[in-house]
Amino acid sequence: MTEPDATAPAVTAPEVITETAALRAALAGRTVAFVPTMGALHEGHLALVDRARELADTVVVSIFVNPLQFGEGEDFDRYPRTLEADTAALAQHGVDVVFAPSAAEMYPRGGGGIRVVADASALHFEGASRPGHFDGMLTVVLKLLNIVQPAIAVFGQKDAQQVHLVRRMVADLDLPVEIEVAPTVRDADGLALSSRNRYLSATDRATALALSRALAAAAAAAAAGEGPDAADAAARAVLTVQPGLDLDYFAIVDIHTFESVTDEHVGDARAIVAARVGATRLIDNAALRFGSADDGADE
Ligand code: AMP
């Protein structure tokens, strides 16, 4: 028998579980930090996993491309599915269990079952462009939280309106889970990592950088003492001159209500943007602070 190499890092493949009952049995009595994903994992997802690793003894990652949160004509069918590579990456990050259910396991009654309905803050921005998206997202998140029963669930700031709605659902429905939010991971050039970036051509990629440049322009205006209207104008000056970029929305929103702020707004806010580049729809956001004192806007 060969002795194990004591210098090699200990990599244990996560247990991949596809059925709810088996997952419940595997997790009984364990304190779990949970990272829900749709797979096609990149460093942004893995940063959430690393955060989860710090927060509980057992880390569970779900990989499920949720049909309920895709609208007609969206990319459900062509969404990348890379379970083997995902599981290998998660092994390197010390994940204990991967939950990868089928659609039939999650929705045995098809699309006709009872669903979560978001509040009016889901009607703007992503919700306006993607009707039903947030009801579908909240429904699957609630189901996953009920199946996994984690102490903590980790989400990415990249999906700012999603984070807002998940927090609201947890508060409004008294869910016994703590929500942890991790910062957006970006490529060196500023592009926020996304499973959809793989669809960008080299030209598209250069075009897509206008999103993070526009957010930086808004943040710089706010940091220079300008108000929301001037910050909005600074961002739009970047977005509207960018050839090949089809702007869906840019807005500066209140971090508590996710409503657009007025020019009188002082304190924390979030700039959010969505645009289509080629056939790919991209979103991004950044923290802004209006007014003089800087007491720590993080991202
Ligand atoms: P998804 O697989 O796109 O549903 O994303 C799963 C989780 O990863 C969500 O909480 C996302 O907000 C988060 N996420 C996606 N991209 C990034 C990123 N670039 N940085 C940090 N978190 C991310």
Image (spheres, helix red, strand yellow):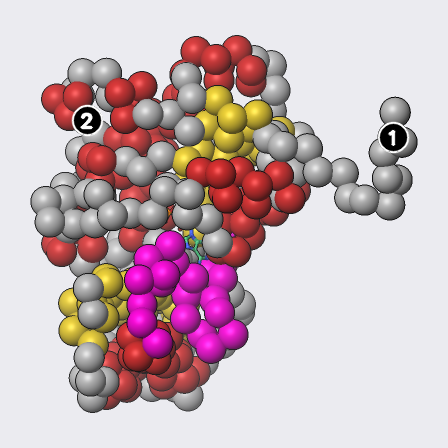
Label 1 crowding class (10 Å Cα cut-off): few <14, some 14-19, many 20+? few
Residue pictured at 28% horizontal, 36% vertical: 66
Q: Give the mark nearer the N terminus: 1 vs 2.
A: 1
In the image, residue 109 lies at what x, y percent?
18, 16
CB at disc 2 and ligand 1 closer than 8 Å: no
Instruction: Please provide the residue range marked out in magenta.
Output: 181-202
Is residue 193 shown left or right of residue 257? Answer: right
Q: Would residue 53 be seen by someone viewing this image from the given angle?
A: no
- Toward the viewer: 165 or 11? 11
In the image, residue 231 lies at what x, y percent?
29, 82
Label 2 crowding class (10 Å Cα cut-off): few <14, some 14-19, many 20+? some
- Toward the viewer: 282 or 238? 282
Instruction: In the rendered view, tell whether residue 22 sits above or below residue 232.
Output: above
Instruction: In the rendered view, tell whether residue 179 sits above or below residue 156.
Output: above
Instruction: Please give the residue where the numbered disc 2 appears in the rendered image.
Output: 115
Q: To which quarter of the image does residue 280 belong?
A: bottom left
Residue pictured at 62% horizontal, 39% vertical: 91
Main SS of the magenta part reads: loop
Residue pictured at 36% horizontal, 34% vertical: 64
- Give the residue type that dot 2 points to: Arg
Q: How many marks?
A: 2
Q: Which secondary structure lies at badge 2?
A: loop
Residue 193 lies in the magenta stretch: yes
Instruction: Please give the residue where the numbered disc 1 appears in the rendered image.
Output: 2
Q: Which secondary structure lies at badge 1?
A: loop
Residue pictured at 41% horizontal, 88% vertical: 224
Residue 281 lies in the magenta stretch: no
Is residue 164 shown left or right of residue 157? Answer: left
Q: Which part of the image, by quadrant, shows the N terminus? A: top right
- Give the residue type that dot 1 points to: Thr
